[in-house]
């Protein structure tokens, strides 16, 4: 198996979103962050969809259309994350993690698309 972007980027990205999704659902720190983001009502939804996106990235290594959908959803979610951070006045450095994951997932969308 060659080291394609879905493999080299998909696995660590999926692991990052599994960790983030679990922390969204179960930690007090993330509850406080979502209050700071002014979107506490979306914390559980975001945690669940991040776990779903992570699973889709992993499944996408065998079924590219699933990876494509997962990467697209995570790209859009991270774009919204950057927008929220800008709206609340965070610095670009504070928004950089969401921006980086937005770009990685956008690359994964392109990579999965090529596999279809």
Image (cartoon, rainbow, N blue to C red):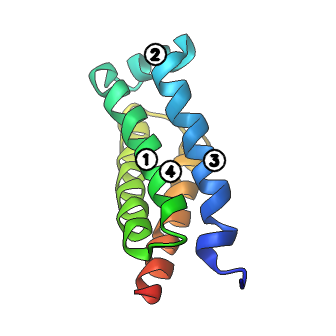
Which of marks 4 and 2 precedes in the sequence? 2
Which of marks 2 and 3 precedes in the sequence? 3
Relative side of 70 to 61, left or right: left
- Placement of 32 over or under 100, stated as above or below: above
Indicate the quadrant where residue 38 lies: top left
Tell me, yes or no, if residue 77 can be seen here.
yes
Indicate the quadrant where residue 58 lies: bottom right
The CA span between labels 3 and 2 is 21 Å
The CA span between labels 4 and 3 is 7 Å
Point out the image quarter for the N terminus. bottom right
Q: Which mark is residue 60?
A: none
Which of marks 1 and 3 precedes in the sequence? 3
Residue at 48% across, 26% down: 24
Residue linked to disc 3: 15
- Placement of 34 over or under 93, stated as above or below: above
* Secondary structure at numbered mark 3: helix
- Mark 1 packing: few (<14 Cα in 10 Å), some, or many (20+)? many
Q: Position of residue 94 (x, y in %)?
A: 58, 39
Which of marks 1 and 2 precedes in the sequence? 2
Residue linked to disc 2: 31
Q: Position of residue 23 (x, y in %)?
A: 55, 26
Q: Position of residue 36 (x, y in %)?
A: 43, 20
Residue linked to disc 1: 82
Residue linked to disc 4: 54
- Placement of 37 over or under 4, stated as above or below: above
């Amino acid at each position: 198996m060659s080291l394609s972007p879905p493999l080299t980027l998909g696995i660590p990205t999926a692991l990052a979103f599994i960790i983030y999704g679990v922390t969204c659902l179960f930690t007090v720190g993330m509850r406080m962050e979502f209050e700071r983001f002014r979107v506490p009502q979306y914390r559980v939804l975001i945690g669940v969809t991040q776990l779903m996106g992570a699973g889709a990235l992993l499944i996408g290594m065998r079924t590219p259309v699933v990876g494509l959908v997962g990467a697209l959803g995570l790209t859009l979610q991270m774009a919204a994350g950057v927008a929220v951070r800008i709206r609340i006045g965070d610095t670009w450095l504070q928004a950089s993690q969401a921006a980086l994951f937005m770009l990685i997932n956008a690359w994964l969308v392109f990579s999965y698309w090529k596999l279809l």
